[in-house]
Amino acid sequence: MSYKDLLVVLDPEAAARERIAFAATLAERFSAHLVGLYPLPTPEAPRHFGYYDPTLLDPFFLELRERARSAAVKMREAFNHVTGIRGLSAEWREIPEGPDAEPALHARYADLVILGQLDPDRAETELIRPRPEHVALASGGPVLIVPYAGHFDNVGRRVLIAWSATREAARAVSDAMPLLTSADLVTVLTIDAREGPHAHGELPGADIAVHLARHGVKAEIERTVSAGLPVGEALLSRAADLGADLIVMGAYGHSRVREMLLGGATRSVLRSMTVPVLMSH
């Protein structure tokens, strides 16, 4: 089992160049085809709002569109440079900027989608970039989210699986299998696990560890309690203690009212992550 086509979603932000290198390294590892997807902003004057003076607004929005086009050209050149030097099979796609569903449509034809974490201190990034959790909920496949700060060039050597015995967690483990089978250390972590046949089983984490072993993955099992700490924070704290370079977890939420019903642990991890996170819904 391997990833054969990867899709990296890019934007004008400086961190996107780091994301290109990150995606290219994964494409090299798996001999995969790499697609660079760039949602191109197309700002338009708000003609439907009251008074509209084309002599004032049209030149302004024309300049915005030219800047957006220039940024896209620079990012395409960076993408082509990196993939060319590494001799990768690659292609570049530009799509009109729009709802988060648009990147999700392209994501359905890739084994793995790579996105960047939104900078929680820069609210404006939400206006120009797709939200990773939206793509995770709508794409039907796994997303690998890269923190907005830091350098990550050897992801997947020390993996922490956030195991909750749910459909989403099982899907994430299955989607991460190409990374898990090549990892040096895999830890299965349960937090506040409930024992029993309709929950985690008699020994929480044991069943998924047996499943992983059949794929050649030797996993260590850890069980902990949140002790009043939000589950997402407890997960990130343990990842730091273990020196994990990748977290694998389910993405919890409902796609129709995503902001309202996104799971608390999912939201917490997306906000405070310091290592890449692979999520599946």
Image (cartoon, rainbow, N blue to C red):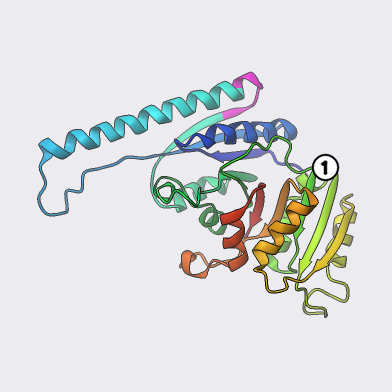
Rendering coords of residue 79 (x, y %): 54, 27
Residue 186, image x, y percentages: 83, 52
Taking the spot 80% from the left edge, 68% from the top edge, the residue there is 224
Query: Which residue has dot 1 on it?
Result: 182
Instruction: Classify residue 230 as left or right of residue 190.
Output: left
Quadrant occupied by the C terminus: bottom right
The answer to whether 239 appears left or right of 132 in the picture is right
- Image side of residue 253 versus residue 275, left or right: left
Q: Position of residue 111 (x, y in %)?
A: 65, 45
Near-viewer residue (160 or 122): 122
Q: Is residue 232 visible?
A: yes
Q: Is residue 88 magenta?
A: yes
- Residue 58, quarter of the rendered image: top left
Residue at 52% across, 25% down: 78
Residue type (three-letter) at the residue carrying disc 1? Ser
Q: Is residue 229 left or right of residue 55?
A: right
Which of the 4 image quadrants contains residue 94? top left
User: Few, some or many C-alpha atoms within 10 Å of disc 1 (few <14, some 14-19, many ≥20)?
Assistant: some
Give SS at disc 1: loop
Measuring 57% from the left and 49% from the top, which residue is drawn there? 108
Quadrant the N terminus occupies? top right
Q: Residue at x 10, y 36 (%)?
A: 55
Q: Inspect this view and state whether residue 140 appears.
A: no
Which residue is nearer to you in this view: 233 or 255? 233
Write the start and end of the magenta stretch as one range.
84-90
For residue 212, above or below residue 13:
below
**Was residue 238 drawn as part of the magenta stretch in this picture?**
no
